[in-house]
Image (tube, helix red, strand yellow):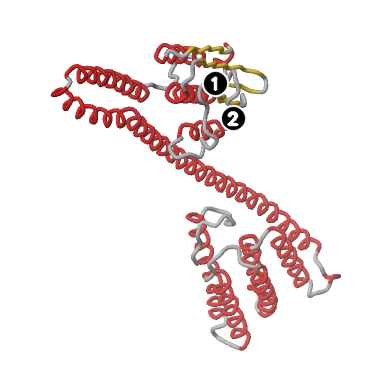
């Protein structure tokens, strides 16, 4: 018999298979022992009775092997149980009628009832066997039933049924616990796979951002410098003063490119919040952007923001950093306002600017990974990111992140 780890098994497959095979061997040995014992007892006068019980034992063993040993899935259907136990009880009645020692076969049938049947069929089968045994002992006369034997059989039935139910439900509880543990392990592996995928996706987006920044800041500048150098080289022969002026322009472009490169490198080196409170990190970022770009940045941060869960703080920090970086690079803004508030409903971060605004399809345009990254990060912890760019004063563009105070488990 070949079992796989089936959730319907009462025990794990590695334990259940040896357990089942042990009882298969015991059952086969019992059938063979009754056959050999009967032939040995009647060896002096072998008659039709010996042939009859031997044939019945062979039939019982054959049915058992076919229905329980050579089966590939557990549990088998109820009709198989009905064939085996119905035929087995009938054979036992005939065998015990022909030879008294076959009465002991009743204990094997009782054990098989508990080992092979579900609770309700097992209890019904045990009660039926004990009732038939009691009637057979009384020669099938109700008036001839021995009260002592009836009480003994009833006690045997009650005790064995009680022990069976205790063991059955203990094994069932163990099986359910094992299945739950397996499901939890599978869920953990899935979460680890998702986390690894998220890390790889973040790395890919960061590479794309770096490539985009280098292209925007250095690629265009270097192309322009190449053309201007060629022009300056020609001008030196005919107009040295104009060539000098051209060189001054190129020097300015080189300094601007170096400053842009430093900002890109600084962005690579900028860590997360680390041990800094979120309020301090946001205010420092606003000051840095203002000093670097000349933009007037107003920062209003609720002190209670330092008490929010770390996963929310990290998300708001990344949103603010991305929004301010976009403003500094692309918005051509003169005024920016950063407001963060905490309430019973959640925490809210709003970054507004008076720049040129965003195109209507900003989220869908190739290369706008920062905006999509902000939205995915906010929505990943149950929040909402709203980006509006309607060209109305005083604020042209608004990036607003709203997060619940209790973030879902990651």
Q: Residue at the left extreme?
A: 237
Which residue is depicted at the point 63% across and 62% down? 111
The residue that label 1 is drawn on is 351
Q: Are marks 2 and 1 in contact (CB under 8 Å)?
A: no
Compared across the picture, whether 326 is left or right of 391 comes to left
Compared across the picture, whether 251 is left or right of 94 comes to left
Toward which corner of the image does residue 54 lie, by quadrant? bottom right
Q: Residue at the right extreme?
A: 143
User: Looking at the image, is 60 positioned above or below residue 245?
Assistant: below
Element carrying mark 2: strand
Which residue is depicted at the point 52% across and 23% down? 316
Q: Residues within 10 Å of mark 1 (few under 14, many from 20)?
A: many
Residue 229 or residue 164, whichever sits in front = 229
Q: Residues within 10 Å of mark 2 (few under 14, many from 20)?
A: few
Label located before the other in sequence (2 or 1): 1
Q: Position of residue 130 (x, y in %)?
A: 73, 65
State how far apart marks 2 and 1 are (Cα): 11 Å
Element carrying mark 1: strand
User: Looking at the image, is 151 positioned above or below residue 187?
Assistant: below
Which residue is depicted at the point 29% across and 28% down? 221
Residue 75 marker: none
Which residue is depicted at the point 40% across and 38% down? 200
Residue 197 or residue 103, whichever sits in front = 197
Q: Residue at the front extreme?
A: 238
Q: How many marks?
A: 2
Q: Position of residue 206 (x, y in %)?
A: 39, 33
Q: Position of residue 260 (x, y in %)?
A: 33, 22
Toward which corner of the image does residue 180 lie, by quadrant? top right
Toward which corner of the image does residue 391 lie, by quadrant? top right
The residue that label 2 is drawn on is 386
């Amino acid at each position: 018999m070949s079992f796989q780890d089936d959730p319907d098994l009462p025990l794990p497959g590695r334990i259940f298979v040896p357990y089942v095979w042990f009882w298969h061997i015991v059952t086969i040995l019992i059938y063979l022992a009754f056959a050999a014992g009967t032939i040995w007892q009647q060896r002096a006068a072998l008659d039709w009775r010996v042939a009859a019980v031997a044939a019945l034992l062979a039939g019982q063993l054959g049915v058992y092997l076919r229905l329980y040993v050579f089966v590939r899935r557990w549990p088998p259907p109820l009709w198989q149980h009905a064939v085996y136990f119905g035929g087995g009880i009938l054979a036992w009645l005939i065998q015990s009628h022909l030879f008294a020692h076959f009465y002991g076969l009743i204990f094997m049938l009782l054990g098989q009832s508990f080992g092979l049947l579900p609770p309700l069929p097992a209890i019904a089968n045990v009660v039926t066997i004990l009732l038939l045994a009691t009637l057979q002992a009384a020669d099938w006369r109700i008036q001839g039933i021995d009260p002592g034997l009836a009480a003994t059989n009833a006690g045997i039935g009650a005790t064995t049924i009680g022990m069976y139910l205790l063991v059955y439900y203990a094994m069932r509880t163990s099986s359910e616990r094992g299945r739950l543990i397996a499901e939890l392990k599978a869920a953990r592996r899935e979460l680890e796979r998702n986390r690894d995928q998220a890390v790889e996706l973040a790395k890919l987006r960061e590479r794309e951002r770096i490539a985009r920044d280098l292209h925007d800041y250095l690629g265009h500048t270097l192309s322009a410098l190449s053309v201007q150098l060629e022009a300056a080289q020609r001008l030196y022969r005919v107009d040295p003063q104009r060539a000098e002026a051209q060189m001054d322009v190129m020097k300015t472009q080189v300094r601007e490119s170096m400053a842009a490169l430093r900002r890109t490198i600084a962005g690579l080196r900028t860590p997360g919040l680390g041990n800094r409170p979120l309020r301090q990190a946001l205010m420092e970022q606003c000051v840095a952007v203002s000093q670097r770009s000349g933009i007037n940045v107003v920062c209003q941060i609720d002190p209670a923001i330092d008490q929010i869960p770390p996963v929310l703080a990290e998300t708001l920090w990344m949103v603010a950093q991305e929004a301010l970086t976009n403003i500094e690079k692309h918005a051509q803004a003169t005024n920016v306002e950063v407001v963060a508030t905490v309430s019973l409903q959640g925490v809210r971060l709003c970054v507004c600017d008076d720049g040129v605004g965003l195109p209507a399809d900003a989220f869908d345009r190739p290369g706008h990974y920062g905006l999509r990254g902000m939205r995915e990060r906010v929505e990943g912890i149950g929040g909402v990111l709203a980006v509006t760019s309607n060209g109305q004063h005083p604020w042209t563009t608004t990036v607003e992140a709203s997060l619940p105070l209790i973030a879902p488990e990651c």
